[in-house]
Image: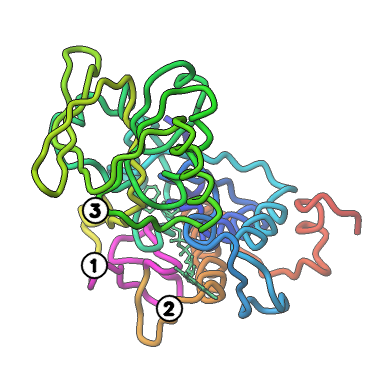
């Protein structure tokens, strides 16, 4: 069981800046995110798009903003638990006990939910039997491409991820690319490169087909794909990859006994506390009169929630407001000389 002054759920821009604020005032924190990377919507949905309304930053992309927030955390030692979804939150006397889907457990007086629009989850294949092979022969993201070397891989999808991986894996694997339409949604140059590989026999392309069945015992052996005109083909394959984009689900957060209104959590505007003492909600996931779903609002909300955590984490101390420019305490924590 990991003990911490505060647990942050969500490593989007709000969670990151909230972590900074907690560390600055001398509290420990750990951060959990369901994604395998830091940055929330900025990194997952628009890494290359410029943002124009971050105060004092005239223009930066989603990726640049994320990198700057990560750099701002450099003076502090913060543990990130990525690819883990917080599933359970339970009260135990004056603490909250929190458990992730990977079994990591935390005990903390403060939970800050910075969960945005919920956890991002891959859109999955329809046939029920696919679950049996998930993370063994069926994947929705690639961590280690070497496992596909000299194997047959069937890739489903028509966007950039499906096309990029079909091109990349065709170097060392036998690749089938299956898409339910004729048109692709990837960049034109990528589509062109993929079609050249199809012409040269490096990729087998099946358009207007969808996955109908997966066949095998312990190991996946083949799949059945069905054409729009109902014709079924059986394809021998070692691996199946699905790239259908992400869905956002409030998921387990809906079951923690909080005041939820249209997929957002009601909070006060003094501490950004929810209906449960010691549980705060900040960023896109919180709501209150006048709430603006902007990154700058999340920064403000995180700064106030962090100060509220102090009282429960250090019940015998009084929180004293200080500026980073002039406080020797804060400068020390930031690793700067006075
Ligand atoms: C295309 C687009 C353009 C935008 N442009 C702008 C702009 O120009 N200016 C602006 O201010 N805002 C913009 N926004 C909005 C901005 O991105 C959001 O306001 C911001 O990302 C909210 O940050 P957050 O940290 O609250 O949530 P998010 O960025 O959504 O991060 C939440 C994180 O929590 C994680 N999570 C959720 N539930 C769990 C769980 N149970 N366990 C573990 N992890 C969990 C998620 O995986 C996610 O990584 C834009 C949004 C989009 C989609």
Instruction: Tell me: 149 left or right of 217.
Output: right
Label pair 1/2, CB-CB below 8 angstroms: no
Which residue matches tag 1? 259
Marks 3 and 2 sit apart, C-alpha to C-alpha, by: 21 Å
Give the camera-side residue of 71 and 41.
41
Q: How far is disc 1 from disc 2 in space, using C-alphas?
A: 15 Å
Q: Is mark 3 within 8 Å of ligand 1?
A: no
265 magenta-colored: yes
Q: Is residue 11 above or below residue 303?
A: above
Query: Does 49 appear in magenta?
Result: no
Magenta range is 260-285
Number of labels in the image equals 3
**Mark 3 Cα-neighbour bin, 10 Å: few <14, some 14–19, many ≥20:** few
Q: Which residue is label 2 attached to?
A: 269
Give the mark, 3 or 2, whose residue is nearer the N terminus. 3
Q: Residue at x 78, y 57 (%)?
A: 329
Within 10 Å of disc 2 (Cα), the crowding (few <14, some 14-19, many 20+) is some
Side of 276 where 150 appears, left or right = right
Residue toward you, 145 or 164: 164
Q: Is residue 182 visible?
A: yes
| SS state under label 1 | loop
Residue sitting at 19 percent across and 38 percent down? 211
The C terminus - image quarter: bottom right
Q: Residue at x 56, y 54 (%)?
A: 189
Residue 48: x percent and y percent?
60, 62
Which residue matches tag 3?
256
**Residue 145 screen position, x and y as percent:** 50, 26
């Amino acid at each position: 069981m990991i003990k911490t002054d505060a647990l942050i759920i969500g490593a989007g821009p709000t969670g990151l800046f909230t972590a900074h604020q907690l560390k600055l005032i001398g509290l420990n924190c750990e951060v959990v995110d369901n994604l395998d990377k830091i940055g929330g919507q900025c990194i997952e949905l628009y890494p290359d798009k410029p943002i124009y309304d971050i105060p004092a930053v005239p223009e930066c992309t989603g990726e640049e903003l994320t990198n700057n927030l990560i750099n701002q955390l450099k003076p502090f030692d913060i543990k990130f638990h990525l690819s883990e979804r917080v599933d359970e939150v339970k009260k135990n006397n004056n603490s909250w006990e929190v458990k992730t889907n990977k079994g990591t457990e935390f005990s903390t007086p403060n939970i800050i939910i910075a969960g945005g629009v919920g956890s991002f989850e891959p859109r999955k294949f329809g046939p029920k039997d696919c679950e049996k092979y998930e993370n063994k022969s069926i994947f929705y993201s690639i961590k280690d491409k070497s496992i596909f070397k000299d194997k047959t891989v069937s890739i489903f999808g028509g966007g950039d991820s499906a096309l990029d991986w079909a091109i990349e894996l065709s170097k060392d694997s036998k690749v089938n690319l299956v898409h339910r339409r004729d048109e692709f949604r990837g960049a034109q140059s990528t589509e062109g490169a993929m079609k050249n590989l199809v012409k040269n026999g490096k990729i087998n392309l099946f358009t207007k087909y969808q996955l109908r069945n997966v066949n095998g015992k312990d190991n996946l052996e083949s799949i059945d794909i069905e054409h729009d005109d109902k014709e079924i083909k059986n394809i021998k394959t070692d691996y199946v990859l699905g790239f259908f984009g992400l869905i956002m689900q409030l998921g387990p957060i809906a079951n923690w006994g909080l005041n939820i209104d249209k997929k957002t959590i009601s909070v006060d505007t003094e501490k950004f506390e929810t209906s449960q003492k010691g549980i705060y909600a900040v960023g896109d996931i919180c709501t209150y009169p006048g709430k603006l779903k902007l990154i700058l609002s999340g920064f403000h909300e995180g700064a106030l929630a962090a100060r509220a955590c102090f009282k429960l984490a250090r019940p015998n101390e009084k929180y004293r407001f200080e500026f980073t420019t002039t406080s020797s305490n804060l400068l020390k924590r930031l690793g700067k000389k006075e």
